[in-house]
Amino acid sequence: MSGTFNDETGGHGGDLVRAARQWKQDGGDLLDFSSNINPLGPPEGLLEHLCESLPDIVNYPSPQARELREKIALFLNVPEEELLVGNGANELIHLLLLWQRPRQVLIPAPSFSEYERAAVLSGAAVERYSLLPGELFDPVALGSMLKEGDLLVICNPNNPTGVLYRRRDLLPLVEAAKDLGVKIMIDESFIPLTGHPEESLRDLQSENLWVTLSLTKLWSLPGLRLGCLIGPAGEVQELTRWGDPWRVNILAQKAGLFCLKQKKYLEKTLALIEKERNFLTGRLLETGCFRVFEGAANYLLVQGTDPAFKVADFQDCLARQGVLIRRADNFYKLDQTYFRIAVRKRDENQRLIQEIENYVKKQYKNAKINQEAGGDQS
């Protein structure tokens, strides 16, 4: 890494093999706060269930994840004909843009980098609209940017800021976009982890609206990949008819079917995230060295307030102690003072805070030594 980002992933977190090589750590020894998945890990019993399912890999998976698709539709309370299951939400974002091929894609800034990667790959021009940390969402100003043939992207809650936008603010925007001939894609990958399903638009049957959802993050399955796309029934059926019928592998399908039965898992998840997000926020603010942006998801955007703070040095220091954070200075308009951390379990969060406090003490000590040395020279 060496202060740069990996072009293979666009700078995403969770690249433990690369991080281990950079900081000469065993990947299993790195405590990963750089990727945002369910802090509980996969539901209890899932690994054993997948081991029992391994002999099934000699068979083709169910086309279009038929059984899983039926169950997810019930779980999300959406019509099955409006649902497409895929190999993670990211794959479906790329698929949608490659299929729609919009003239221009309007993308929030800063936000998830895959929107721009997918837009460029589809041949679309890219225009950004500002959603900087601490800024209020202005649907009127955003609506004024829309032009026929565009595709508007909204990440809700936004990544990396964690801001959750209200349904009542988004509904007029969807209607205005429809009148202008503009498609909207709302990425709701983290809404299930906010505890606010009422802000989702997945139940809104609009001819110009698409909603993506990551099940990878919800059930802590980044290595298997699961996601879904919800949209107009006719267009979803066209994608179903002409798209890859075996997009979702057999183990991912079996994992999804297992996870859907775990009713208490999500309740425990939401309680843990809220408690630990508050814990991390409080402890970071106590150091007096960081600004923490209020978010609704299982991650926090943080800014170092010391003028000398450099996130590359901060990341390097923590990684050498076995703790990996997500630098945020490759997000559009975020500089080298920003980073993002996942919300994890209490013992893991305490470890992170301890290493951050050690870093702060070391920096304070070095600054004091430099100040005294400067005083002696005068």
Image: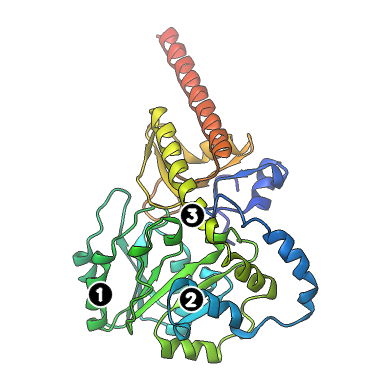
Q: How is the image coloured?
A: rainbow
Q: Residue at (52%, 36%) from the top-left corner?
A: 314
At label 2, the amino acid type is Leu
- What quarter of the picture does the C terminus occupy? top left
Residue of label 2: 74
Along the line of sight, which residue is nearer the eye, 222 or 200?
Answer: 200
Q: Residues within 10 Å of mark 1 (few under 14, many from 20)?
A: many
The reply to whether residue 183 is visible in this rendering is yes
Q: Residues within 10 Å of mark 2 (few under 14, many from 20)?
A: few
Disc 1 versus disc 2: nearer the observer:
2
The reply to whether residue 328 is visible in this rendering is no
Give residue 302's position: percent from left, percent from top.
41, 42
| Distance between the alpha carbons at the discs numbered 3 and 2 | 18 Å
Disc 2 element:
helix
Q: Is residue 112 above or below residue 135?
A: below
Disc 3 element:
helix
Disc 1 element:
loop
Give residue 42's position: percent from left, percent from top.
62, 57
Residue of label 3: 267
Mark identifier at residue 329: none
Q: Residue at (77%, 67%) from the top-left corner?
A: 52
At label 1, the amino acid type is Leu
Mark identifier at residue 146: 1
* Cβ atoms under marks 3 and 2 closer than 8 Å: no
